[in-house]
Image: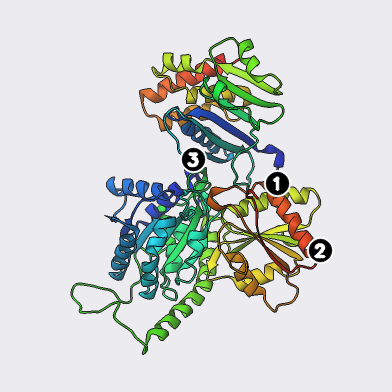
Amino acid sequence: MSGVRQVVGMTGDEAVAHAVKLVNPDVVAAYPITPQTIIVERYSDFVNNGEVDTSFISVESEHSAMSACVGASLTGARVFTATASAGLALMYEILYVASGMRCPIVLAVANRAFSAPINIHGECTDQLVCRDASWVSLFGESAQEAYDETILSFKIAEHPDVMLPAMFGIEGFIVTHALERVETLSKQQVEDFIPASRIVRDRFCPDENKTFGSLVLQDYYMEIKRQQEEAMQNAYKVTEDAMQEFSEMSGRKMEIIEKYQLEDADYAFVSYGATAGNAKAVVDRLRAKGEKVGALKIRLFRPFPSMDIFQALSGIKAATILDRSATFGSPGTIVQTDIASALYGKENVPSLHGYINGLGGRVLTLPEIEEVYEMSKEYNNIGMTSTTDWVGYRK
Amino acid sequence: MKNLAEITDVRINGRGGQGAVTASRLLAEAAIIEGQYVHAFPNFGPERAGAPVTSFARISPEPFYEKTEVYEPHIVVVIDPTLLDDVPVVEGLRDGGTIVVNYDGEKDSLVKYFEGVHANIYKVAGSIIATEEIGRNVPNLVMLGALIKVTKLVEIESLKKVTLNRFKGVLGEKNVVAINRAFEEVE
């Protein structure tokens, strides 16, 4: 079925645009913001050139972009948008409307630091702080994963057991604007993977009288929220199955968590996004020095794969969590606190050492990651089971 | 261990508007059509036309994982000779690395810029070639012609192919002529 694999050089943003083109959604409503801009620019070219059937709605803000997506989605349309940083923050109110009204919108996030000070570079805080908005949330390491997760996200979001919006993130510039090789899929492969149009049980249509988004007070609000939680729990299995099917279709292994050299490891890195690539590169360097170390990459952030992470880290002495996000006054880094919750009370689990790093595009170099690894070992040696540090900044 | 030694890091030093970004992209695209693996990107900042800019290409025949900026390039390409006086173009260059400069003077006078630097130094009169063959002083792809002659990072046919794909018609053909000439004239 897959035949000869086509390999094309694309940036992360271009990969997203080309993958959306294969999906050919009914509606794209978006507002440009660096470093997401190329996604929307390329896609508007496709629309202008008649290469897709999509209605492209130009709006004056991200709040309007997500609002237009919600409206379109309620008519049964397949909908895509993309944003970053301040744009995602401006969408935040409507993120909850999208999930509460069970709109399976797909959102690409070009992860970028928040102002102030103003900064356009890579950092994942923008997406992580949307963790409670009832959106499925994925991260990608490369242009290839950006391409693949674009297509995958529609499959997960629109599944009848889920019917929640999905976002996936790639880091600004180091992935969005970097050229890499991307194995592409054929139109036919994508059509076989996702149905030609959404499976719609209920929608706005001109000849029926319906109300969506009505007032719900103490009487039913909590039941509706509980349904969202059940949908989110369903999303785990749906994601697992969709990744399995995608792997078979594409020939590229795709899993909720990726385990690298973990089988015999005493120590582990835990990370997500582009940082996971650097962690694997450091594992290669440390293995060459005889260190028994591996790396765990989290691709699915919501629903959080607690059991997978517990199993992967079981028997590890110390875990070095590289978190490219900022949080202040927290008991740990954003991802560290999730991992700590997942492992709490379980036996044979590692000490957890979280490191806030890479803010605003700062690079934590491979030698610096090796230093951080040594820090974690030292913490573990002196019996500290949980630490959090900022690394890679001028003291 | 995954071929730690086989990754080649290239830094291109140019000025805003001279096509340093296009150069790193086309070098990477040429590597991709040969089945190599790449990570190529510009150093984005507050760029203006004429201001010093850098772009990078990390290339390997085998898959690799790292996604960092390039701090210790194996190869430096200098698109604009006036950068030699303004920018530390050899910063981070690996011991025994390669530097290829757009320079129309004698090679001996160029070597003086790099006293104490342990590197293979090459020059080609990129601006002259670009002006004569393309009709404009845009020597970005010209410099790639010189680069691949002395480093064999990619085949010249691959570079010509991606150049013609990027620049359709006469402009692409003129660039190919200029690339050929730089390939022959680099010293």
Does residue A280 appear anywhere in the picture?
yes
Looking at the image, residue A208 lies above or below residue A248: below
Q: Can you identify the residue that label 2 sits on?
A: A381
Q: Chain of mark 2?
A: A
Q: Chain of mark 1?
A: A
Q: Nearer the viewer, residue B179 or A333?
A: A333
Q: Position of residue A387 (x, y in %)?
A: 69, 65
Q: Chain of mark 3?
A: B
Total marks placed: 3
Secondary-structure class at tag 1 = helix
Q: Can you identify the residue that label 3 sits on?
A: B44
Residue count near mark 2 (Cα–Cα under 10 Å), binned few <14, some 14–19, many ≥20: few
Classify residue B104 as left or right of residue A312. Answer: left
Residue A248: image quadrant is bottom right
Residue placed furthest toward the front: A395
Q: Can you identify the residue that label 1 sits on?
A: A367
Q: Are marks 2 and 1 on the same chain?
A: yes
Q: Nearer the viewer, residue A179 or B70?
A: B70
Mark 2 to mark 1 CA distance (whole Å): 21 Å
Identified by mark 1, the residue type is Pro
Which residue is rendered at x = 77% and y = 60% of the image? Answer: A377
Classify residue B177 as left or right of residue B156. Answer: left
Classify residue A290 as left or right of residue A294. Answer: right
Secondary-structure class at tag 3 = loop
